[in-house]
Amino acid sequence: MAGHAYTEQRSAFLRRIRHRLWMMIALCLLTRAADAALGLHLIEPIDPPEVQQLIAAPAQKDQTQ
C-alpha cells in the first residue's frame, strides 16, 4: 500500500505543477496580448534584423580569429 500512496502523492504533485505551468503560460500570453492590444509597449519586441545580428555575431567572431 505504501507504493500506491506514493504514486497518488506524486501524481497530485505533478498535476499541481502542470496546472501552475499552464497558468503561467496563459498569464504571459494574456500580458503580451493586452500590451499589444492597448499599445502600452511595456514588452519591447526584438526586431528580426537585430535578432539576426545577435545570432550572427558569435559566428563572425569565430571566423575572424
Image (spheres, rainbow, N blue to C red):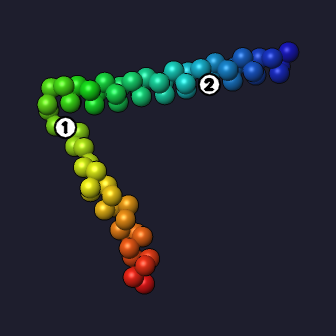
**N-terminal-most mark, 1 or 2:** 2
Residue at 20 percent across and 30 percent down: it is 36
The CA span between labels 1 and 2 is 33 Å
In-front residue for pair 20/60: 60
Classify 39 as above or below 50: above
Mark 2 residue element: helix
Instruction: Tell me the amino acid under the disc marked 1.
Output: Leu
User: Residue 10: x, y in percent?
Assistant: 69, 24
User: Residue 21: x, y in percent?
Assistant: 49, 28
Residue at 51 percent across and 21 percent down: it is 19
Q: Residue furthest bottom?
A: 65
Residue at 39 percent across and 76 percent down: it is 61
Q: Say which residue label 1 marks.
A: 42
- If the image is split into quadrants, where does the N terminus sit? top right
Q: Say which residue label 2 marks.
A: 14
Residue 27: mark: none
User: Residue 44: x, y in percent?
Assistant: 22, 43
Q: Is residue 42 left or right of residue 27?
A: left
In-front residue for pair 63/10: 63
In-front residue for pair 33/18: 33
Mark 1 residue element: loop
Classify 4 as above or below 55: above
Q: Is residue 12 left or right of residue 29?
A: right
Classify 56 as above or below 39: below
Quarter of the view holding residue 4:
top right
Classify 41 as above or below 56: above
